[in-house]
Image: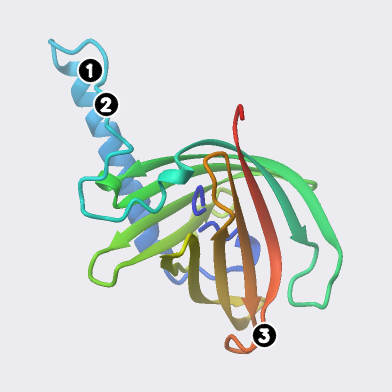
């Protein structure tokens, strides 16, 4: 994964949880704030329905990098069956993603359904913008491992391509992780993930996602 630019790392089964506690707290804060807004609206006499927040109007000064991903998507996944193992066998499966802006545009939250051949699961992608570094951080929370949030990747967009990188471990060995967003249009987008076991000297692309706007 993502979408929780989705972490959009759908590699939760082997990723470490070094940043877990902080990112889980961040997710809970986002969820708690939303619940508080809805509760307040329901108890105010002059409002019969919760007031909708303007999700597509950032007020924080953050770049509008993720406007293209707001809304509902169908996702076609293509993933290596074995990573960093010299595999050339790929598996394909479907999924969906729904993304909303948060934090006045300085964050995003996406809910993802991944229909793996071995069983469907859900995951959440969380993004947040740091104006001090002018970078986005992306975390991924897999519902199968609800106490572990993967270490973030960080980066941004240039000339229509988003590149995000971070450090992690895979099967006990240190790796670098790279996300790339490209081929972005009003109704489609492409995402891919790659691992490097040698500090970035070589990369193995192991997961591809092609997004199509639902109903398009």
Taking the image as shown, residue 190 lies to the left or right of residue 30, namely: right
- The label on residue 42 is 1
User: What is the distance, in whole Å, between disc 1 and disc 2 at their CAs?
Assistant: 6 Å
> Which residue position holds label 3?
202
What is the quadrant of residue 121 in the picture?
Answer: top right
* Camera-nearest residue between 71 and 12: 71
Q: Is residue 149 visible?
A: no
Callout 2 secondary element:
helix
Callout 1 secondary element:
helix
Of all residues, the one furthest to the front in this rendering is 159
Taking the image as shown, residue 24 lies to the left or right of residue 33, namely: right
Q: Nearer the viewer, mark 2 or mark 3?
A: 3
How many C-alpha atoms fall within 10 Å of the one at disc 2: few (<14), some, or many (≥20)?
A: some
Taking the image as shown, residue 137 lies to the left or right of residue 114, namely: left
> Which residue position holds label 2?
38
Residue 174 image offset from top left, x and y in percent: 58, 83
Q: Nearer the viewer, mark 1 or mark 3?
A: 3
Up/down of 52 relative to 152, above or below: above
Q: Residue at x 39, y 54 (%)?
A: 65
What is the quadrant of residue 30 in the picture?
Answer: top left
Quarter the N terminus occupies = bottom right
Q: Is residue 190 visible?
A: yes
User: What is the distance, in whole Å, between disc 2 and disc 3 at their CAs?
Assistant: 48 Å
User: What is the distance, in whole Å, between disc 1 and disc 3 at their CAs?
Assistant: 54 Å
């Amino acid at each position: 994964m993502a979408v929780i630019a989705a972490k959009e790392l759908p590699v939760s089964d082997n990723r470490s949880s070094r940043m877990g506690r902080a990112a889980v707290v961040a997710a809970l804060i986002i969820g708690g704030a939303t619940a508080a807004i809805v509760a307040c609206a329901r108890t105010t006499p002059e409002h019969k329905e919760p007031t909708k927040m303007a999700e597509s109007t950032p007020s924080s000064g953050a770049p509008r990098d993720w406007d293209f991903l707001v809304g509902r998507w169908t996702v076609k996944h293509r993933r290596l069956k074995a990573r960093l193992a010299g595999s050339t066998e790929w598996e394909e499966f479907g999924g969906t993603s729904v993304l909303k802006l948060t934090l006045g545009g300085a964050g995003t939250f996406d809910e993802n359904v991944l229909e793996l051949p071995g069983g469907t699961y859900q995951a959440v992608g969380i993004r947040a913008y740091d104006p001090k570094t002018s970078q986005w951080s992306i975390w991924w929370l897999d519902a199968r491992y609800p106490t572990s949030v993967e270490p973030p990747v960080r980066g941004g967009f240039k000339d229509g391509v988003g590149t995000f990188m971070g450090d992690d471990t895979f099967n006990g060995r240190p790796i670098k992780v790279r996300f790339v967003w490209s081929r972005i249009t009003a109704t489609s987008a492409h995402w891919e993930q790659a691992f490097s076991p040698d500090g970035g000297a070589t990369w193995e692309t192991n997961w591809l996602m092609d997004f199509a706007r639902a109903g398009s």
